[in-house]
Amino acid sequence: MRKLALNEEILLSVQQPARYIGGEVNMIKKDPKKVDVRFAMCFPDVYEIGMSHLGIQILYEMFNRRDDVYCERVYSPWVDLDRIMREKNIPLFAIESQDPVRDFDFLGITLQYEMCYTNVLQILDLSGIPLHTAERTWDDPIVIGGGPCAYNPEPLADFFDLFYIGEGETVYFDLIDTYKESRKSGESREAFLKRAAQIPGIYVPSLYEASYNEDGTLRDFIPLCPEAPAKVKKQLVMDMDGAVYPEKPLVPFIRATQDRVVLEVMRGCIRGCRFCQAGMIYRPVREKSVERLKELAYSMLKSTGHEEISLSSLSSSDYRGLEGIVNFLIEEFHGKGVNVSLPSLRIDSFSLDVMSKVQDVKKSSLTFAPEAGSQRLRDVINKGLTEEEILTGAGEAFKGGWNRVKLYFMLGLPTETVQDIEGIALLSEKIAERYYEIPKEQRTGRVQVSASSSFFVPKPFTPFQWARMCTKNEFLDKARTVNHKMKEMKNAKSLRYSWHEADVSLLEGVLARGDRRVGAAVESAYRKGALYDSWTEQFNNDIWMEAFEECGIDMDFYTSRERGADELFPWDFIDTGVTKEFLRREWENAAAERVTLNCRERCAGCGVRRFGGGVCFEDQN
């Protein structure tokens, strides 16, 4: 019988004990004694969120296809179990075997959101792994980070042995084979890290040194040995049909955030929104064939018993096989108790027709993401969505039976004016008015328009990486302006408005744009009790303010100043394929309110052609 790291008494005393016991449908079991490499794959958040992450499901499947590797899972214990584990000195363990994480060869941590950084230190701490890579020996796992936040790994540089830059299906096996050779030949840990640095896409922070100018900006960032490349190039999967995909995905015992079969239809995005990091770092667009998606749909539904299937991508409407796969899913599964979910659709006549077939309009809201309240500002951010398109789409949806609309905006975007800010309320009102243009007998009750604003964070590898962030008071003043304007509208009773927490956005900005010096504040905040910072009920801004003050770090340096044209960024050593020259050109286009056409209309010369595939290589008319 499989041993449990937690006894029954402990499990009964915590919320959701099923988070920690394993044994789910499609869980892979191996004999740890019969493998050469044990890999603990970690999502540094609660189980329900981690189980919804497609990337870990893909890597879990890929690693476990190798007979010599056993990949298991690790999630952050919730605060109740965290406290018990510290009191009773219970080491963090993997879900499958319940073995301590410290016994593994690798600990891979996916970095999806900056506000999970203190959870990363929780994982290391509870595992008994020294927080700093400089203090680790062969008795500790190799700690490797990946995911979108790894595109600026510097705030976490002291805590990770390696970072994997790019998509995990490409060179992970090269890394594992190098590790096996290194251990077999008796090499030191340092020797292995130097060998790993020579694998494309692998970044070893300890092999680089940063120096700074008197004004605090980065002066230089140089490799300390010949094995470490000056540039680390991201790794991409180009053959989406041939890539590993989990045909038997794990099925949690408790409801996960996304409790459904997920079909990834493509990677990348053609749109070029200037605020969107994912749209830049995941270029070029690469699509799966409709035939491959059909095969996956059958096998995944059969192996899981899920009653919902969802299409996944940054912009599903831009998948060229969308009509074919949607019609197939509707014909094959919709009448058999399987719902079809279509996130990330642009609101056009085809999308609305599709949604009317697969959604119960009485139970669903329609979602638009105008991002900005005025057309001028939508042009600045290159959103590629006009007010008329928004209003036409809303009108068609209302005729189709919808009466609830969600609108997503950002506040604090570059060049934003009071007119742009008030435009959020005005656009919301125009959408409500469009509803009441429908004859009364055709309406389905009162319309509800719910608008929400996040606060703009200029992310690395976007055209807005040079931009400043607003201060907390500036953000809140903008939100209050929208809220006040909403209450003045004729249809105010049909309008709802909410906004994100400014403190969280500013902290996200520091962690997203920071350099190595920021790591000291992350550690200080963790030691003062910061944990689960992405959870409103757990976030304590006072702790972070104390940590920054203690470490002598000025948040404004990282957030509220505009960057110089020639400033060296902490992430400039990473080659995403998209050139800095292109990003700067787009920054200048934004200032001039010039729209850049999407990648299928005209090539903008971003630089990713050198990857040798994707939408860039189609004939351009």
Image (cartoon, rainbow, N blue to C red):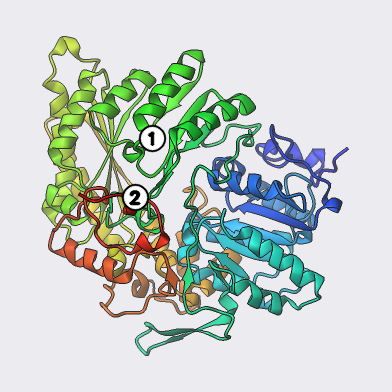
Q: Are marks 1 and 2 in contact (CB under 8 Å)?
A: no
324 left or right of 550 in image: left
Q: Residues within 10 Å of mark 1 (few under 14, many from 20)?
A: some
SS for dot 2: helix
Does residue 262 sit above or below 38 in this rendering?
above
Does residue 224 sit above or below 282 in this rendering?
below
Asked if one can make out residue 188 in the rendered structure from this viewpoint, the answer is yes
Q: Earlier in the sequence, mark 1 or mark 2?
A: 1
User: Residue at the right extreme?
Assistant: 1
> x, y (%) of residue 221?
46, 82
Residue at the location (61% across, 49% down)? Answer: 59
Q: Which of 128/269 is in front?
A: 269
> x, y (%) of residue 120?
59, 60
Q: CA distance from mark 1 to mark 2?
A: 22 Å
Asked which quadrant contains residue 207, the reply is: bottom right
Residue at the location (85% across, 51% down)? Answer: 34
116 left or right of 588 in image: right
Total count of labels: 2
> x, y (%) of residue 456?
30, 56
Amino acid, disc 1: Pro
Q: Which of 153/232 is in front?
A: 232
| Residue that badge 1 annotates | 343
357 left or right of 528 in image: left
Asked which quadrant contains residue 88, the reply is: bottom right
Amino acid, disc 2: Val
346 left or right of 363 in image: left
User: Residue at the bottom extreme?
Assistant: 214
> x, y (%) of residue 214?
37, 90
| Residue that badge 2 annotates | 615
